[in-house]
Image (cartoon, grey):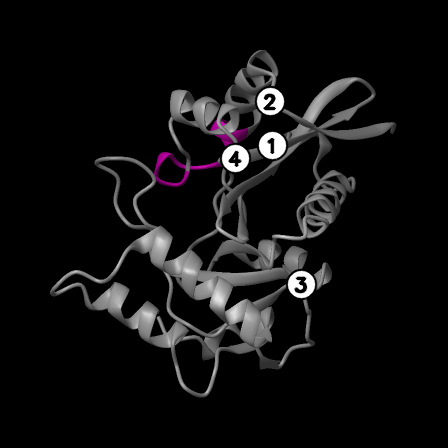
Amino acid sequence: MSLHIEPTSDAHLLESVYREILEPSFPATELTPRAAFLEQVRNGDLDALVARADGAVCGAIVGERVGSTVLIAWLAVTANRRDRGVGSALLAAGIERWSASPDVDLVLAEIERPDLHLADPAFGDPYRRIEFYARHGAAALVMPYYQPPISEGMPRVRGLILTLVASATPAPAPGILGADEAVALRSYLLETFGPAERGDDETARIHAAAGAADGIRVIALNDYGEIPV
């Protein structure tokens, strides 16, 4: 298999990626509507890398830039190319691209907790996703987390692990997130969630965990049971 990965902002190609790769791989609660997706790539809020195998588009990784943090918003591979190294190659390419930027401190991902989300034939198996990211050196941040509504009218997606994929000064897990990375994380959370509104205990707990005096613990992904829900 000849695999080629490159960044793109080509609208026609991204239309195909959205329709043929992202839409079948993610529920509507986790996928930005098509028009907004294309606009966000066009204005630079999203950065998309597309994989081709033997000339055919077969996968994509999309990063969302928030301050000095990049969140891996979506990583997906076509059904006929899964378990053939395409996902690993896309993740490596994304990490290399975003980590090379001097103003990126963190690369994060949101992963469903296997104890709170069931495997789905279309949308994947949380256990396998944990194993995939763990193989590539990712770790879990010990703090509660949810995905804010992806678009108007959509619910919060709860039961997620905020995952540290790469950082400017990586430290092995278990440990404590570095001071600069903690600052970047707090900035990311504030921009993503905004300050907690009155009565919003969920968001308040996230901000409180990010500002804990004893730091933010980083643990192995397989130890996600230690993370408060």
At label 1, the amino acid type is Ala
Instruction: Give the labeled residue for mark 3.
Output: 168
N-term mark: 3 or 1: 1
**Label for residue 140?**
none
Q: Amino acid at mark 2?
A: Ser
Which residue is drawn at the image coordinates 68% and 48% (left, top)? 101
> Do callouts 1 and 2 mark residues in contact (Cβ within 8 Å)?
yes
Is 193 drawn above or below residue 17 in the view shown?
A: below
Residue 2: horizontal and vertical position, in percent? 87, 27
Residue appearing at x 29%, y 50% in the figure: 156
Where does label 2 land, which residue?
9
Q: For the view shown, which residue lies furthest in the top direction?
A: 12
User: Which sits earlier in the primary sequence, circle 3 or circle 4?
Assistant: 4
Highlighted range, magenta: 22-30
The amino acid on which the numbered mark 3 sits, given as a three-letter code, is: Ala
Q: Nearer the viewer, mark 3 or mark 4?
A: 3
Q: How many marks?
A: 4
Q: Is residue 164 left or right of residue 193?
A: right
Tell me if residue 29 is in the magenta stretch: yes
Q: Which mark is residue 48?
A: 1
Q: Is any atom of residue 16 visible in this view?
A: yes
| Sequence-first disc among 1 and 2 | 2
| Residue 226 screen position, x and y as percent | 46, 79
Question: Is there a contact, CB below 8 Å, between mark 4 and mark 1?
Answer: yes
Q: Main secondary structure of the magenta part?
A: helix
Which residue does the numbered mark 4 point to in the structure image?
Answer: 46
The N terminus lies in quadrant: top right
| Residue 21 forms part of the magenta stretch | no
Distance between the alpha carbons at the discs numbered 3 and 2: 26 Å
